[in-house]
């Protein structure tokens, strides 16, 4: 059943940006994608809170049924919406989907799209590893009790998940006047800047500064997500937008968090067993050892910090390329 939900989610995430592109002109797609993406952290926070409340009264099975009802109702409402014209807001005009071989050739020949895919892959390599391992880091290295660590983590994640996408679209559309170059600039700068709060998270121990660093790290990471989705449906022809989005999302997960999450664990084990040069171990511990168990923190930093640098430079390379 969980797999069936995943199939639906994957289809939704591939097709929704295409629909948004047909409802919003290119200069406002970043803002439109930001509102779309904000729904994810808001829905997750409300769903978890509501499911816990319902489960405490009627059990988890009832909670699963009840929290699914709003989605079913909205699905019937959306079913009656008028289908937008594919590419109707683009200069190229309405488009139809070409053959699969033509789609593959067009995507592989589109250098801007390829730079976007690999830049976002580096970013997901970084951010999904942070989201996966950070709660454990807070408990094991920073010695924060489990309930307190998870509660504060959720309280930080929700506002950051709202502010980040909206701030990214605001800077790109309002300050930099929108367009592909503005979107790539914001993606590059925010990816580079995620290094600062990551270093702070590794070095800090005091609760308020630590969670402040976590808050800004998530904001910076989320600023580029709606812009990446907007770029993915703008730099390709209207007839292949859903396929391009599907290729983007599949690639970033296969080459991103599918590798980075287990890699952090492997590197942590290497650090813990002392299988690194003694001088390097003393340097890392002296610079970032903030708790009784710093192996995981050091592993997280060593694995993901290069991804921030690589991702930022790949976005800059995409900025300098013509479609």
Image (tube, rainbow, N blue to C red):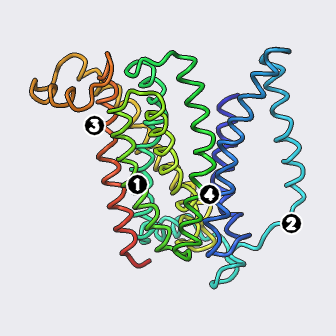
Point out the tag, 2 or 1, that comes first from the N-terminus: 2
**Foreground disc of the pair 4, 2:** 4
Q: Is residue 35 above or below residue 263?
A: below
Check the picture and name the quadrant holding the C terminus: bottom left
- Dot 2 lies on which element? loop
Q: Which residue is mark 1?
A: 191
**Residue 272 x/y as whole percent:** 25, 18
> How many residues crowd mark 2 within 10 Å: few (<14), some (14–19), many (20+)?
few
> Spatial distance from mark 4 to mark 3, Cα to Cα?
30 Å
Q: Which residue is mark 2?
A: 82
Point out the tag, 4 or 3, that comes first from the N-terminus: 4
Q: Is residue 130 above or below residue 23?
A: above
Check the picture and name the quadrant holding the N terminus: top right
**Foreground disc of the pair 4, 3:** 4
Task: Write down the quadrant of residue 143 in the picture.
Answer: top left
Point out the tag, 1 or 4, that comes first from the N-terminus: 4
The residue depicted at 36 percent of the width and 75 percent of the height is 320
Point out the tag, 3 or 1, that comes first from the N-terminus: 1
Q: Which residue is mark 4?
A: 166
Q: Is residue 72 above or below residue 262?
A: below
Q: Is residue 277 above or below residue 236?
A: above
């Amino acid at each position: 059943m969980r797999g069936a939900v995943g199939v639906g989610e994957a289809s939704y995430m591939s097709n929704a940006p295409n629909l948004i592109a047909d409802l919003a002109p290119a200069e406002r797609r970043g803002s439109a994608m930001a509102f779309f993406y904000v729904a994810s952290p808001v829905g997750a926070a409300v769903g978890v809170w509501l499911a816990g409340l319902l489960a405490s009264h009627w059990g988890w099975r009832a909670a699963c049924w009840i929290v699914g009802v709003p989605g079913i109702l909205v699905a019937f409402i959306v079913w009656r919406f008028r289908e937008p014209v594919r590419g109707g807001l683009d200069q190229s005009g309405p488009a139809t989907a070409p053959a699969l071989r033509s789609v593959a050739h067009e995507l592989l020949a589109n250098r801007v799209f390829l730079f976007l895919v690999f830049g976002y892959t580096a970013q997901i390599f970084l951010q999904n590893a942070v989201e996966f391992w950070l709660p454990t880091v807070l408990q094991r290295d920073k010695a924060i009790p489990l309930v307190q660590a998870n509660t504060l983590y959720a309280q930080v994640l929700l506002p950051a998940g709202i502010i980040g996408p909206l701030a990214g679209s605001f800077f790109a559309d309002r300050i930099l006047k929108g367009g592909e170059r503005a979107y790539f600039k914001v993606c590059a700068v925010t990816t580079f800047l995620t290094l600062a709060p990551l270093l702070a998270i590794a070095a800090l121990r005091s609760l308020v500064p630590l969670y402040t660093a976590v808050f800004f790290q998530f904001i910076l990471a989320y600023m580029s997500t709606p812009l990446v989705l907007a770029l993915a449906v703008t730099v390709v022809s209207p007839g292949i937008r859903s396929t391009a989005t599907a290729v983007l999302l599949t690639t970033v997960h296969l080459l991103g968090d599918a590798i980075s999450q287990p890699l952090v664990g492997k590197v942590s084990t290497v650090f813990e067993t002392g299988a690194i040069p003694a001088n390097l171990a003393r340097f890392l511990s002296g610079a970032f050892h903030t708790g009784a168990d710093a192996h995981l923190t050091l592993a997280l930093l060593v694995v993901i910090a290069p991804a921030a640098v690589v991702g930022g430079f790949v976005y800059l390379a995409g900025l300098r390329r013509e479609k």
